[in-house]
Amino acid sequence: MSAAMGLNAIDAVKKAPRQHGAMEYSEAPTDLNVVRGYRLQRLRDALKAGDYAGGLFFNQLNTRYATDATNMQVWCAHYETRCVFVCTDGPVILFDYANHPHLATDLPGVDEYRAIPSFYFFSVGPRGEERVKMFADQISDLVKTYGGGNNRIAVDHVSIMAASALQDQQISLHDGEGLAEMARAIKSPEELILMQASMNACEQGIREMRAILEPGITENALWAKLHEVNIRLGGEWIETRLLSAGPRTNPWFRECSMRPIELGDMVSFDTDLIGPYGYCSDISRAWVCGVDQGDIKPTDEQRRLYAKAYEQIQYNIGTLGPGKSFREVTESTWTIPDEFLSNRYTSCMHGIGLADEYPSIKHKADFNAKGYDGVFVPGMVMCVESFIGVEGGREGVKLEEQVVITETGVERMSTYPYETNWL
């Protein structure tokens, strides 16, 4: 599928909910096996370029990327209990927390299914060192069988105990987290179609949140609606609980609480939603409680804060494009006024895919201390961030937009409107 065809298909998926009501997610809008094949090949190409015999991935997002295995991802993220070993030239072996091979029956990228010899403490208590040796023996055998004499492997998340056991087998361990992040950064046209389906579910959740926003509803109850809609439409989980109202909006990063939202409160939120097919939809909007019912109008200060956040978002989207360097974009972004600088968001923009991903683009004020360079290429998906709040001020506005880097510029993935009548 060409990039142009991919964008046309994305546009069709974007419009579907408005044309036909809530989208049915029982059938994928594109061939999932094409997506799975693309992702596995991206990992293998990265392993080959790094001269690795294979990659061992415990990070559940990397395991999902390689295999599309989804069972109990959040639970498995707590323990060293499911992983995948991707041979650069050889099979893909999924190690699961127990022997349930039916969970991988429909996954064409999984060549072999094994139950991992559990070695995390919850499962085996003080017998971890005995059990981890069994696991290291299996990885060593795979490296010897398929590595062609190469003992170098890329690894993302392993405990000290597991790393030591692998090194005792003369396996050379190297960073696999960055390797996987770089592989995941460029989406295929089919991946973009799945990401748009996730965004559609996210926006339906936002619409239903707004419909129930009224004085007296708690922050938690409002946030629960987004969870409910996401699950109802085939989504998976939400990474954070970033919704707050009134004085809890400034500074940012307070998670939702049992505080009732009051008439006239600013309500800001950040979706961080893992939707259908495991893709993240990450946008932010801000409302004022009571405005939709005609009970109140936003104050002059609320309008001023909102206008600045909107200006930052729109300006910074305009700095993006294929072939531009991270440094070039950083240096050309909106200059944050001094009164908002201390409360600025932690990044200017960041990549998105199965979750927040590479790259993270820093603000001009932070580039020398934290920034790094690179190049934007077609297929990257970026989330452009803004938080505007005066230090010591009562409220703040959080806005965020998700865009695709195309061959000619950028295309927005979200159609949910801003409060442009406030500007």
Image: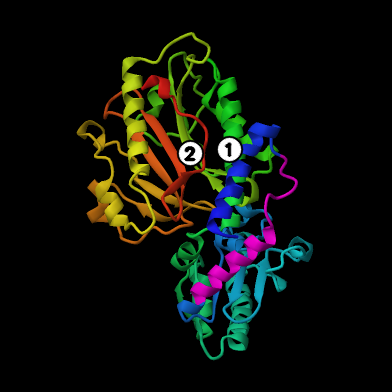
Magenta segment's dominant SS is helix
For the N terminus, the quadrant is bottom right
Pointers 1 and 2 in contact (C-beta within 8 Å): yes
Q: Is residue 56 visible?
A: no
Span of residues in magenta: 24-47
Identify residue type, mark 1. Cys
Looking at the image, is mark 1 or mark 2 earlier in the sequence? 1
Residue found at the very far top of the displayed protein: 295
Residue 211 sits in quarter: top right
For the residue labelled by badge 1, is the local secondary structure a helix, a strand or a loop? helix
Q: Is residue 364 visible?
A: yes
Residue 202 sits in quarter: top right
Is residue 386 shown left or right of residue 45? left
Categorize mark 2 by other alpha carbons within 10 Å: few (<14), some (14-19), many (20+). Answer: many
Residue 56 locus on image (x, y percent)? 55, 72
For the residue labelled by badge 2, is the local secondary structure a helix, a strand or a loop? loop
Residue 111 locus on image (x, y percent)? 71, 74
Residue 24 locus on image (x, y percent)? 72, 40
The residue labelled by disc 1 is 202
Q: Is 332 in the magenta? A: no
Is residue 165 shown left or right of residue 252? right
Categorize mark 1 by other alpha carbons within 10 Å: few (<14), some (14-19), many (20+). Answer: many
Identify residue type, mark 2. Ile
Is residue 299 shown left or right of residue 92? left
Residue at the spot 54% in from the left edge and 54% down from the top edge: 4
Which sits in the foreground, 329 or 118?
A: 329
The residue labelled by disc 2 is 283
